[in-house]
Amino acid sequence: MQEHISTKSRARLMQIGLIVVGLACSLAGSVSIGAQAKSAAPSMAMTAMTQFKAKQYPQAAESFRKAIAANRSDSNLYYYYALCLHYSGDVSGAKAIYNQIMQYFPNSEAAAHARTAIGAMAPACAAPGTSETPSAPAPISSRPASVNTENKAGLSLADMPDEARIYFRNEGGGMVIGAKFNNRPLDSIFDTGAEGIVVGKNHLRALGIPLPAGAPTGMVQGVGGVPQHSWRMPCTVTVGQMERRNVEVTVQEELDTPLIGQTFFQGMTYTIDNNAKSINFVKKTSRSGSIYNDPSKSTDSVPFVREGKEIIVQVRVNGKTIPMYFDTGASGIHLTTAHAKSIGLVVPDDAPLQKSVGIAGTSMCSLVTVKSIALGPIEKQNIEVAVDMESEMPHPLLGQSFFGDCHYSVDEAHHVIHLRR
């Protein structure tokens, strides 16, 4: 069996935005534990359900979390996990799992109940067995935040240079860059697949930076794993000539290598030159080209769309098109069994196995060689992909094994990636 431990601390990091709202409404008993849960993890699922019925919500939450680790395909386990968090007063954590259910299992009964639960988060609702008057929901703006006007999260472009060049080195398929957290140096991964900046408490301790105080404020989810608690804290993050002051950073208990995600380079157009091992950034508001590279001269344009902050491109696998995350933080090409089935990709019974270790635990993947993978003008033949037998991520990951030897520029103004050899 082949084994691979990525230096990138997850195959796919999906960071979930959280909103503090009112206390929980009682929805207990609205769904039952599914047959899959009973067969895959009967003991833990039944223990969890017994604790839930006894209103031992914190204990039940932990039991449902363990049951999910044994069976990640049952949406009802996730729903009961969210309910237990909800009833325990961890409203933000519950909301994260409700949102995850709607994203990963959109047509399930659990998703319908999750939508009801989120809609029920209102002042009229109270946690079962309490007489407290819940706080009013926090207001939600319908106007997207602008990187040119938002200063609270450190996203203003005013202090960013018109353009900058930084250098990277390749480690384990990741692009490692020199970064500083509160002026303390810490190598990090440049990760277009991460929505924000992520660091571990282990890094903060090593750097002598105070840890975030209080209870967890959110959840993070890795491919093949279960949700993990996280904290948020302001930090000044510097990469080369670029600096984000008091930008919001996500902190989790342990992390291999920090991630510099889209929160940092939002508002900048960037070009990656794999020959020079450099990333060239140009402020959107400055000028159309760069002294380092002018992407406007390239005719090799690949359109992309955004899902939240994620870059989605249309990739052809053996002639069949499937949307994928364009992820510089992923070392390879990563699909789930559902994705493989949707494009007719057969996984042989004797396919070699690969172990992937990330922030949310370990998952096993089957390695399959596909005849052709193409994106825009680039096509690679007889390329290996990993099919995760446990993950439920919405789209596959297109990582460095495909475009790591290419020269590409992400043009946010025109929503295209200029991709060429």
Image (tube, grey):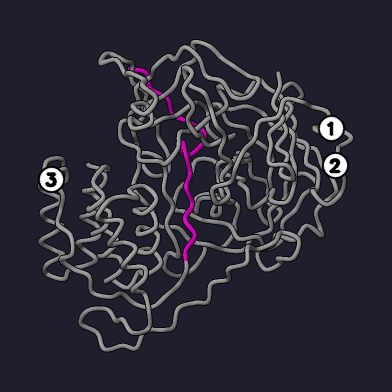
Magenta residue check for 11: yes
Question: Which residue is under mark 1?
Answer: 294
Question: Residue at left 31%, top 30%?
Answer: 389
Question: What residue type is disc 2 on?
Answer: Ser
Residue position for label 3: 35
Q: Nearer the viewer, residue 104 or 173?
A: 104
Q: Point out the tag, 2 or 1, that comes first from the N-terminus.
A: 2
**Viewer-side residue, 106 vs 211:** 106
Q: Tell me whether circle 2 and circle 1 mark residues in contact (CB < 8 Å).
A: yes
Residue 268, relative to residue 314: is it above or below?
below
| Measured Cα–Cα span from mark 1 to mark 3 | 56 Å
Q: Secondary structure at mark 2?
A: loop
Crowd tier of the residue under label 3, counting other residues whose Cα lies within 10 Å: few below 14, some 14–19, many 20 or above: few
Magenta residue span:
1-18
Q: In terms of sequence position, does the residue under pointer 2 or pointer 3 come before the other?
A: 3
Query: Label 2, label 3: how many angstroms apart (C-alpha)?
Result: 56 Å
Residue at 49% x, 60% y is 17
- In this rendering, the answer to whether 269 lies above or below 176 is below
Q: Residues within 10 Å of mark 2 (few under 14, many from 20)?
A: some
Main SS, magenta residues: loop
Task: Report, in whole angstroms, how far the alpha carbon at label 2 lies from the one at label 1.
Answer: 8 Å
| Residue 85: quadrant of the picture | bottom left
| Drawn side of residue 155 relative to residue 310, left or right | right
Q: Which residue is mark 2?
A: 288
Drawn side of residue 12 relative to residue 107, left or right: right
Residues at marks 1 and 3 touching, judged by CB atoms closer than 8 Å: no
